[in-house]
Image (cartoon, helix red, strand yellow):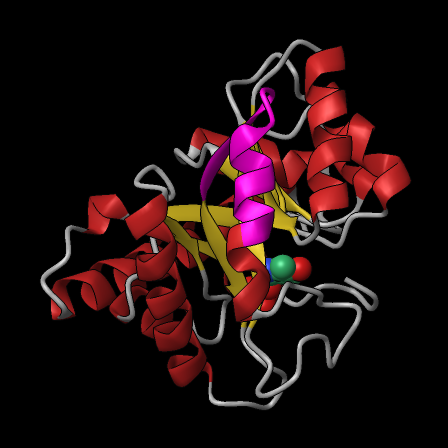
């Protein structure tokens, strides 16, 4: 495919994703501008990120440190916001704090401390979301997707809030595999409401992916993480 053909493919996909965001928001009387579209570009090349930037996208998500770090370095001259959405090995946390603007996947106090050290080291403030497990009746059914149980959200949130280099901004959730995504997003919103009673600045709800972000927006998501609906099916692994 030529570069122009790819750019026009991305433009059409982006227009239709934006239409879905708009209509989901309007269906529950929300302002579509209150929903941030984070385009998840994992596995896709820098050229796609530049095309999307030219189409007005500023928020990009990645889930693997090495790839994210490289892309952030290659594009550091562009005004982008990098969202780290993947599981974090704690020995990588310090380096992620060097380029990530928002880390969606903080799921332990230990990880919060590591991110905080990195943020201090690089003299940055990093926005953080506490990742909540939305798997039914189990804290960590799927270790790869992670997240803390609802009962531990406040403890991790407090660790973020009191760390000087981090800013507690809210919660993130991944719908359970094969489960009821809309119900999971309603639950996440309830957890968010409770957290916000104690931490008023924790207003972000990051929820929803290509297949179900409409339901997430109807349940109150402020950030949707969309990959394949914009970029196409990822080649294996993603
Ligand atoms: C890959 C990924 C997404 C985007 O998934 P799509 O189904 O391609 O939209 C969202 N959130 C996380 C955490 C991801 O890893």
Asked where in the image residue 47 lies, by quadrant, the reply is top right
- Would residue 72 appear left or right of 38 to someone viewing this image? right
Can you say which quadrant of the picture contains the C terminus? bottom right
Q: Which residues are magenta?
A: 155-169
Q: Is residue 164 above or below residue 100?
A: above
Where residue 217 sits in the image (x, y, percent)? 31, 64
Residue sitting nearer the eye, 178 or 232: 178
* Residue at the spot 76% in from the left edge and 22% down from the top edge: 118
Q: Is residue 133 above or below residue 112?
A: below
* Residue at the spot 90% in from the left edge and 38% down from the top edge: 91
Where residue 7 sits in the image (x, y, percent)? 53, 43
Asked where in the image residue 135 lies, by quadrant, the reply is bottom right
- Outermost residue toward the left in this view: 29
Q: Is residue 140 visible?
A: yes
* Residue at the spot 38% in from the left edge and 43% down from the top edge: 202
Q: Is residue 165 above or below residue 85?
A: above
Residue sitting nearer the eye, 222 or 198: 198
């Amino acid at each position: 495919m030529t570069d122009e053909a790819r750019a026009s493919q991305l433009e059409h996909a982006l227009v239709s994703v934006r239409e879905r965001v708009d209509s989901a928001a309007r269906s529950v009387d929300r302002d579509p501008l209150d929903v941030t579209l984070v385009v998840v570009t994992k596995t896709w090349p820098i050229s796609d990120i530049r095309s999307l930037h030219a189409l007005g996208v500023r928020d990009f998500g990645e889930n693997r440190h090495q790839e994210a770090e490289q892309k952030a370095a290659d594009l550091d001259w562009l005004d982008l916001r990098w969202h780290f959405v993947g599981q974090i090995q704690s020995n990588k946390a310090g380096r992620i704090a060097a380029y990530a603007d928002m880390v969606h996947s903080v799921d332990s106090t230990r990880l919060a401390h590591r991110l905080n050290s990195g943020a201090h080291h690089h003299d940055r403030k990093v926005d953080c979301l506490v990742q909540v497990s939305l798997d039914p009746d189990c804290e960590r059914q799927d270790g790869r997707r992670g997240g803390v149980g609802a009962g531990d959200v406040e403890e991790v949130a407090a660790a973020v809030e009191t760390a000087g280099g981090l800013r507690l901004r809210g919660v993130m959730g991944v719908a359970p595999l094969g489960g009821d995504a809309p119900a999971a997003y309603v639950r996440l919103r309830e957890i968010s409401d409770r957290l916000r009673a104690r931490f008023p600045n924790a207003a972000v709800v990051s929820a929803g992916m290509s297949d179900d972000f409409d339901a997430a927006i109807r349940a109150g998501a402020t950030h949707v993480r969309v990959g394949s609906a914009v970029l196409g099916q990822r080649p294996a692994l993603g």
